[in-house]
Structure formats: structure tokens, C-alpha cells
């Protein structure tokens, strides 16, 4: 048990230090983790981490990390979520409208499969509203309206 915890901590450390820390904000990190999940098998895989720690421990750790990051994004105030989404969208190649459309299309992939239904719905609702706000160039979250 202690060995499993040590490996889990080391995977998290390596993931954060080498892959997540350099990404611009929570949505970039969420997109990165979601991209590590095979949509047909729901198995998370990372070639470099799996080579070092094994497939199963990496899958378990990435799944848990994805879920925790997803929940932390939802805990952010809506204005902060808007700021984080804007930060992510402007770093993507292409224009803001196209990138927001991509985000909208990837919305379901960003949601961890084990997340409770009410959090999935809250995330969808928030992201849809934030995409609309950013597309309109308005910020109701910042203006308090």
C-alpha cells in the first residue's frame, strides 16, 4: 500500500513538473489531461510516464488527477473561469471564434467519466455561457450583471 502511494505521488510530481506546470492555466491543463484518455476505452495513457511507472498506475493517477482538476475548475468563481478559458483560447493557433468552437466540441471530452452528473451539467452550462460571453466580447462575469 505504501509503495502504491509512493508511486502515485511520484507520477503526480513528474506529471506536474514536466507536463502540466508549463501549460497556461486550468483549461489548458484540463484539455491536456482529457487528451490522454482514449475515448473508446476510457483508459488514460502517457507513454513516458507509463514507461517509468507502468500502465495501470499511470491510468489510475491520471484519472484521479483529471477528476480533481475538473472539480477545482468548477470551484473557481465564474469570472476566474472566464479568465482561464480566455487564456487557454488565445494560446491556440487560429482565431478566437474558431478556438471557442473547438472548446465547445471538446466539452464532453474535458469531463471525467466518473464525475457526478450534476457536476457534468454544471460544467457544460458554465462552459457554454463562457464561450458565448467570450464570443460576444463581453464579460458579464466581470461587470457583475
Image: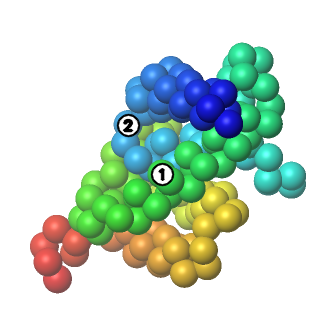
Foreground of the two, 66 or 40: 66
Location of mark 1 (residue): 69
The residue nearer to you, when weighing 70 against 59, is: 59
Reply above or below: 113 against 18.
below
**Where residue 126 sits: x, y (%)?**
42, 73
Density class for disc 2 (Cα within 10 Å; few <14, some 14-19, many ≥20) is some
Q: Is residue 66 visible?
A: yes
- Secondary element under disc 1, as helix, strand or loop, is helix
The label shown at residue 24 is 2
17 over 29 or under it: above or below: above
Percent across and percent down for residue 34 are 63, 48
How many numbered marks appear? 2
Quadrant position of residue 137:
bottom left
The secondary structure type at the circle numbered 2 is loop
Q: Quadrant of residue 51?
A: top right
Nearest the viewer among 133 and 82 is 82
Q: Quadrant of the N terminus?
A: top right
Label disc, if present, on residue 23 of the rendered structure: none
Q: Say which residue appears at 52% left-offset and 74% top-offset.
A: 119
Instruction: Name the residue at 38% across, 37% down.
Output: 24
- Check if mark 1's residue and mark 2's residue have beta carbons within 8 Å: no
Q: CA–CA distance between discs 1 and 2?
A: 14 Å
Q: Position of residue 55 (x, y in %)?
A: 80, 31
Residue 102 shows in the view: no
Left or right of 47: which side holds 143?
A: left
The quadrant of the picture occupied by the C terminus is bottom left
Query: Which circle, 1 or 2, is nearer the viewer?
Result: 1
- Residue 102 screen position, x and y as percent: 58, 55
Amino acid at each position: 500500500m505504501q509503495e502504491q502511494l509512493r508511486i502515485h505521488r511520484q507520477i503526480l510530481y513528474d506529471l506536474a513538473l514536466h507536463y502540466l506546470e508549463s501549460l497556461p492555466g486550468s483549461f489548458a491543463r484540463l484539455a491536456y489531461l482529457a487528451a490522454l484518455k482514449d475515448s473508446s476505452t476510457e483508459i488514460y495513457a502517457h507513454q513516458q510516464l507509463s514507461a517509468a511507472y507502468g500502465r495501470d498506475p499511470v491510468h489510475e493517477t491520471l484519472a484521479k488527477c483529471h477528476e480533481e482538476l475538473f472539480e477545482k475548475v468548477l470551484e473557481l468563481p465564474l469570472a476566474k473561469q472566464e479568465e482561464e478559458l480566455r487564456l487557454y483560447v488565445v494560446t491556440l493557433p487560429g482565431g478566437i471564434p474558431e478556438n471557442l468552437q473547438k472548446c465547445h466540441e471538446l466539452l464532453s471530452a474535458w469531463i471525467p467519466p466518473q464525475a457526478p452528473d450534476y457536476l457534468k451539467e454544471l460544467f457544460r452550462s458554465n462552459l457554454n455561457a463562457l464561450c458565448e460571453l467570450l464570443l460576444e466580447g463581453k464579460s458579464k462575469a466581470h461587470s457583475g450583471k
